[in-house]
């Protein structure tokens, strides 16, 4: 299987928990799964990740980020977009070299107009005074959550805003009593996504593609497949 998409009419919280546990994830208004992905005309294997929140503890990296970012005001609430969020996303997208969805609406809904969503999306925001400087989205199920996207003002890059907001999402989900946090997949041989392996390493699991079960990331080893390869 290369990839598969489904666009359900509804997705109950416990159903989101189930599909996440099977290696599915959100893309716009759909859920999808894939075993491979292409970058720079190379095919790589994808390995899905999750954090077991009851055993999660703050790392020294998170403590350092807290000390680096003590003055930001943090807010978390259900999705509620306005012009500030759209402007911040445009500023971030213009400064980044990698490919992104053209707009927030395209990212969340798959088209350029907002719409009702089957997902319970939460919005985490960082403010410097009254200025919105960072924003991230995650979806909540019954016992699980999936991290969707983070963006921030380019002037704040030195604050490691993207990673900081992921830590804040995880902390928020743990406070809610959730059991799993799913950050998506990482790609062996493609270092751009390796940062996911450094967040909550002691409680991080990956979905073994052959055994179809979750294993501690410490048990990960080269699966012996000839990837990446060019085409």
Image (cartoon, helix red, strand yellow):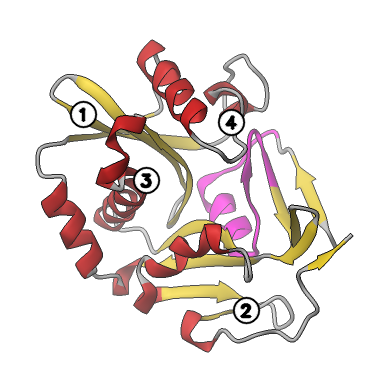
Which residue lies at the image location 65% right of the left edge and 56% below the top edge? 24
The answer to whether residue 183 is left or right of residue 44 is left
Rounded to the nearest angstrom, the CA distance separating label 1 from label 2 is 40 Å
Taking the magenta stretch, the answer to whether it contains residue 73 is no
- Tag 3 residue: 162
First to last magenta residue range = 9-31
First in sequence, mark 4 or 2: give its number.
4
Are the residues tagged 3 and 2 within 8 Å (C-beta)?
Answer: no
Q: Which quadrant holds the N terminus?
A: bottom right
Q: Establish if 157 lies above or below 228.
A: above
Q: Nearer the viewer, mark 4 or mark 3?
A: 3
Quick one: label 3 or label 1, which is nearer the N terminus?
A: 1
Q: Which mark is residue 107?
A: 4
Q: Which residue is mark 2?
A: 213
1 vs 2, front mark: 1
Under circle 2, the secondary element is loop
């Amino acid at each position: 299987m290369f990839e598969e998409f489904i666009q359900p009419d509804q997705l109950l919280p416990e159903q989101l928990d189930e599909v996440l546990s099977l290696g599915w994830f959100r893309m716009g208004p759909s859920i999808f799964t894939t075993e491979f992905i292409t970058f720079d005309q190379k095919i790589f294997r994808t390995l899905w990740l999750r954090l077991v929140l009851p055993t999660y503890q703050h790392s020294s990296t998170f403590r350092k980020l807290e000390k680096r970012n003590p003055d930001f005001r943090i807010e978390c609430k259900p999705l509620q977009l306005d012009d500030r969020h759209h402007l911040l996303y445009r500023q971030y997208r213009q400064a980044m070299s990698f490919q992104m969805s053209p707009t927030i609406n395209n990212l969340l809904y798959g088209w350029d107009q907002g719409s009702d969503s089957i997902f319970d999306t939460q919005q985490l925001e960082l403010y410097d005074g009254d200025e919105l400087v960072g924003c991230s989205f995650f979806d909540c199920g019954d016992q699980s959550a999936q991290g969707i996207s983070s963006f921030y003002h380019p002037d704040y890059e030195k604050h490691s805003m993207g990673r900081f907001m992921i830590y804040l999402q995880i902390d928020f989900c743990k406070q809610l009593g959730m059991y799993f946090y799913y950050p998506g997949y990482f790609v062996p041989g493609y270092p751009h996504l390796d940062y996911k392996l450094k967040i909550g390493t002691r409680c991080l699991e990956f979905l073994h593609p052959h055994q179809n079960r979750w294993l501690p990331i410490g048990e990960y080893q080269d699966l012996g497949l000839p990837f990446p390869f060019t085409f």
